[in-house]
Image (cartoon, helix red, strand yellow):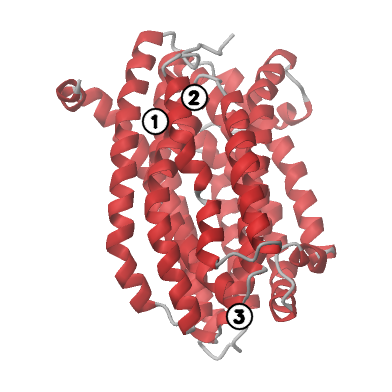
Amino acid sequence: MKDKLLKDKVFLKKLLQLTLPIAFQQLMLASVAAADAIMLGSIEQNSMSAVSLATQIQFVQNMVLMAIVAATSILGAQYWGKKDKKAMNDIFCLSLRLSGFVSIFFFAGCIFFPRVLMLLFTNEEVLISIGIKYLRIAGWSYLLTGISQCYLTMMKVSDHASVTAKVSFATVMINIGLNAVFIYGLFGIQSMGAQGAALATLISRIVEFAVCILISFRKGYIHPYLSGLFKRNKLLSKDYYKCMLPILGASLLWGVGFTSYSAFMGHMGTEAAAANSISAVVRDLICCMCNGLANGGGILVGNELGAGNLKNGKLYGDRITKLAFICGFSSTAVMFLLTPAVLKFVHISDEAHKYLLQMMIIMSIYMIGRAVNTIVINGIFAAGGDTMFDLYSLIVTMWGMAVPLAATGTFWLHWPVWIVYSCTCLDEVGKIPWVMVHYKKYKWVKDLTR
């Protein structure tokens, strides 16, 4: 099978054309968090930690938005394979309505209740104060994020993945450039610290939003009809919610659980919070390839299933699963190789430095599970509408094991930081056998189009 995979030039070309731009886009998005951490960390450790905790609010928002864009991608990929542009427009309009509502909700929370939100993640007053200032500016950008993501998702599934990479690259360059200006106080502008990072994020999101709308008017792109925003396709909406609701449940379980991991570290002191902030940035950077393969592979499988080529969709799924394990072990190797450089580069206290070394070693093993599960569950299973499995697996592995153990170690048994951090990584590694057993049942091989 390995020889056939490598010799199938059509498959490899399609996969690379989807995966590489999406992985690059993911890398660009992760680079913003890395730039924030590096620039704020070079000024003050507490600013870096506070912003890392504050951005967990957007992380939770992104979990909800992820369910919306995932359902859009699943049905969009299948209907694009079927060449049904009317259905594509209906899906687009439905996703815009939902993401607009979600964006307003999170915007209101950040603007009117920032202190309450920060108290969820830390009891350190110095971190809370900085986080409040950050959220009151960054919250405005949350109004635009969901809308932009819907536009970018429709571009990906309609053979314009490379354009989304270019948009993300331009947006990130603007964000990082403005970060330097506002955080360090360049060109005569007063240094703004964490508030500067928030302002840079807001401006870059405004640019991204405007560019997405302008591009959608170009020939060959999907642009939502204004009338479609106020009409509901009942059959398509039913299919959409059938895909989205399990993903939403899984996203919220995963998002809240993952956010609670940051909260546990935040309650173990500023040094643990700082180390966790840096390890999270490194993790997100390395995960870009597996995220790209999950998105690109899912679209490729979805195109085949929507076109009625179920046998080909199953074959593509088998090949992408093999690539998932290769990606996982490669990510582990990269994490080990990067650890000395990361430890040498960051400027944190000696205690935080010790915690970071422990976290990097633990995360190296975690990366195998993260890559395989992301690609198979979020890519292949989702492509055929098999979205309930993710929900079940998170209830058992994350909320049945990882979160309770980490919470117990943090608040009652007072375990060392490295043990609590290990508990937060249990769910991904322990889930692999269950995932592969479910994969072999091939329940995901379905044509969802009407």
Q: Secondary structure at mark 1?
A: helix
**Cα separation between marks 3 and 1:** 40 Å
Q: Which mark is first along the chain, 2 or 3?
A: 3
Q: What crowding class fits label 1: few (fewer than 14 Cα within 10 Å), some (14-19), or many (20 or more)?
A: many
Q: Position of residue 227 (x, y in %)?
A: 74, 28
**Cα separation between marks 2 and 1:** 11 Å
Q: Secondary structure at mark 3?
A: helix
Q: Position of residue 115 (x, y in %)?
A: 80, 69
Would you name the residue on which mark 3 appears? 46
Q: Nearer the viewer, mark 2 or mark 1?
A: 2
Q: Which mark is first along the chain, 1 or 3?
A: 3
Residue 231 seen from this side: yes
Which residue is most to the front? 413
Residue 58 seen from this side: no
Tag 3 and tag 2, C-beta contact below 8 Å:
no
Identify the amino acid type marked 1. Answer: Gly
Which residue is most to the right? 112
Q: Which mark is first along the chain, 1 or 2?
A: 1
Would you name the residue on which mark 2 appears? 381
Q: What crowding class fits label 3: few (fewer than 14 Cα within 10 Å), some (14-19), or many (20 or more)?
A: many
Kindly identify which numbered label has been placed on residue 331. none
**Cα separation between marks 3 and 2:** 41 Å
**Pick the front one: 179 or 85:** 179
Q: What crowding class fits label 2: few (fewer than 14 Cα within 10 Å), some (14-19), or many (20 or more)?
A: many
